[in-house]
Amino acid sequence: MKGVKKDGLFTIILTGLSGSGKTVALNALEDSGFFCVDNLPVKLIKAFVSLSQKTPAISKTAVVVDIRERRFLADFPDAISALRETSRIEVVFLESNDDMLVRRFKETRRPHPLGYRDLRKAIHREAKLLQSIRQEADRIINTSSLSPHQLRNLITGVYSAKKRKSMAITLISFGYKYGIPSEADLLFDVRFLPNPNFIKRLKDFPGTSKRVKNF
């Protein structure tokens, strides 16, 4: 990766197309132990990194910079070039295909930052404007086929220092007359199985007894 040193504060500069999942990615980084800032003006990145380097409790930072900041396109190249000389940084660029971006904007009902009435025109315009920024990226992630959950897992898998936890499975037995447990992710109806409660030799034993378990 460009400009990555061996030690010291590590900073991810997260950028890319509007609607490509930068917020999801930033949240995943925050959950992975990064100190995160959204929509930071490019001219403040150097000061932010410098301040973070002086804070022992902070070892990893992530900032989102994108088209929402008016000086973004003009200031980004020089700012990144200067940071690469003194800091460990990685520029991550998120993108997606036009159809998926249109779908996401329609689902959220939020306007495109460029303000065009024609959404596809705004998407094409932004992609063209960000082409030079994309060329600065150390990592490009296309999120077209990724759900928010999948993108979160991808970001966590790449940048989390924590070991991946094994899956925890909790089995709950319940009575339908009391309602379905609200925390259930999967529900299996096993009422077709033989019920020890209706077997004379077992009905008086609790479900934790060895006889019922063996049954």
Image (cartoon, rainbow, N blue to C red):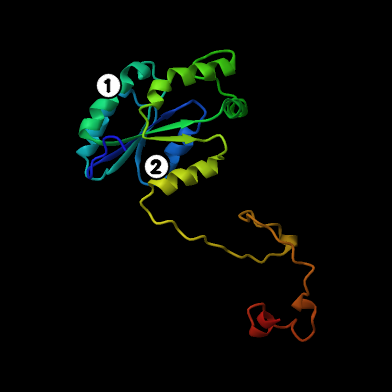
> Which of the 4 image quadrants contains residue 185?
bottom right
Which residue carries the number 2 mark?
30
Which residue carries the number 1 mark?
78
Where in the figure is residue 68, as x and y percent of width and height?
43, 20
Q: Are marks 2 and 1 in contact (CB under 8 Å)?
A: no
Where in the figure is residue 34, as x and y percent of width and height?
35, 42
Q: Amino acid at mark 1?
A: Asp
Kindly give the residue lying farthest to the bottom in the view shown. 201
Give the class, few, some or many, for how many residues have Cα within 10 Å of label 2's Cα (few <14, many ≥20): some
Where in the figure is residue 125, as x and y percent of width and height?
50, 16
> Quick one: quadrant of the C terminus?
bottom right
Measured in 3D between alpha carbons, the distance from the residue under mark 2 to the one under mark 1, in whole angstroms, is: 26 Å
Residue occupying image coordinates x 63% and y 56%: 184
Q: Is residue 51 left or right of residue 73?
A: left
Work out whether 185 lies above or below 16: below
User: Which SS class for mark 1?
Assistant: helix
Q: Is residue 199 left or right of residue 151?
A: right
Q: Amino acid at mark 2?
A: Glu
Q: Is residue 14 left or right of residue 207?
A: left
> Which of the 4 image quadrants contains residue 108?
top right
User: Which SS class for mark 2?
Assistant: helix
Sooner in the amino-acid sequence: mark 2 or mark 1: 2
Q: Is residue 196 left or right of residue 125?
A: right
Q: Nearer the viewer, mark 2 or mark 1?
A: 1
Residue occupying image coordinates x 56% and y 28%: 97
Residue occupying image coordinates x 53% and y 16%: 122
